[in-house]
Amino acid sequence: MQIVVTGLNHRTAPVELREQFAIPEAQLGEALEVLLAQNGVSEGVILSTCNRVELYTVESASGEKQGSASFFREFFHVAEHRYINHLYRLYDAAAVRHLFNVASSLDSMIVGEPQILGQVKQAFLRAQEVRATGPILNHLFTHALAVGKRARSETAVGTQAVSVPSAAVDLARTIFDRLEGKRVVVIGRGKMSELALRHLKRENVREVIVVGRCLGHAHRFAKEVGASARPFDEALTFLDDADIVLASTRAPHMLLSAAAVRQLMRRRHNRLLLIVDISVPRVVDPAVNDLENVYLFNIDHLEEIVAENYRLRLEEARKAGALIEEETAEFLEWFNSRQVVPTIQAFREYLETVRREEVQRVLSDLSRFTPEQRELIEQFSRALVNKIAHTPTVRLKSAPDPETASQFSAALQALFDLQERQNRK
């Protein structure tokens, strides 16, 4: 038996191809049935996300040429030449290492992204629900989930902000230490504003106000993000009580001039104000940064933070990689031993049978030996058998990979005719 990963992802296939093979949640049960019907497949889990479609299977070695590789053709009814050059197929150690990398988000488009561990868990649970898994994949995925958690707890692979909205929130946390109770004003609406607000709300900010020149548009966006709305005014009175300002809009001119912000700060008695301008072109006068107790950052500042944070994530990913090698070796030790245990048991049973027969033959004349001598012969024969069995047992259990373990196991079975002896029982 072998562990196999068959799939395509953001590295091997363009989005135009990946989207053809996306499997909706409602069809996963049917897909797993088709997967288990493939030649030689005995266990299966399907991981389908926006960046990957991967089949994790336990297959017989004889099914290697077809096996799970034929799933894509049969389930999606797509000609093989359309996808075969984008498909990867990994076996045993490489397959285990790959899953551990996926669960630890080291194989993600954005290294350290938090969603993948939950997606791996859901794929595993869905396969269990339809009884598509067995002892090997149950052990593998349980181990993978533990590895993913360990990678996050023992390294900082997922802690640094690597998107502009999350970097803006990290920046605010640096300026204010704690964001709980702070008032946030958003000028403009759009995806970047929405993402930044989602991050800010997790920090328990006190109030969020959306400001726009068109109050109707501002109200609609505010309703979507759970905020209130106010109209824009040139005097910037909507910023009198603000702590954090996020500008993400388009305008033909600067919306926040240095002169207007200077008047604003007088009304605020110079209370600290953070302004993050992620608009392109910028809508906040750069001279605002020269004012006392005003901190102004633009999109370039945030992208510099993101680039540095991503570099730090990659450093942490190298640490997590060492952890994954350790965990892969541990799993393979279990998997290899599971493969050879029946052979070891059969080999030891054979040796014990021979031992008993030969001891019985020697001891058949009871008059030749005292009870003490008989016991010594028994002890000696057991020790001798254990010595003979020790090295083959250790070599089988410590085989470097499942293929070698299988070869060792087959050789031992052939040399001592173990399979035939088992069949005669």
Image (spheres, rainbow, N blue to C red):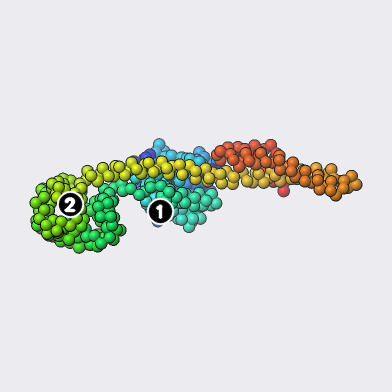
Q: Who's the residue at 29% across and 42% down the image?
A: 307
Q: Secondary structure at mark 2?
A: strand
Q: Which residue is mark 1?
A: 118
Q: Are marks 2 and 1 in contact (CB under 8 Å)?
A: no
Q: Quadrant of residue 390?
A: top right
The percent coordinates of residue 268 (x first, y second) are 14, 59
Depth check, front residue: 154 or 387: 154
- For discs 2 and 1, the disc positioned in front in the rendered view: 2
Which quadrant of the rendered structure holds the N terminus? Answer: top right
The percent coordinates of residue 420 (x first, y second) are 70, 42
Q: Which residue is mark 2?
A: 294
Q: Who's the residue at 56% across and 38% down the image?
A: 400
The percent coordinates of residue 161 (x first, y second) are 31, 48
Dot 1 amino acid type: Gly
Dot 2 amino acid type: Val
Residue 55 placement, left or right of 185: right
Q: Who's the residue at 17% across and 57% down the image?
A: 271
> Can residue 344 be seen in the rendering of this structure?
yes
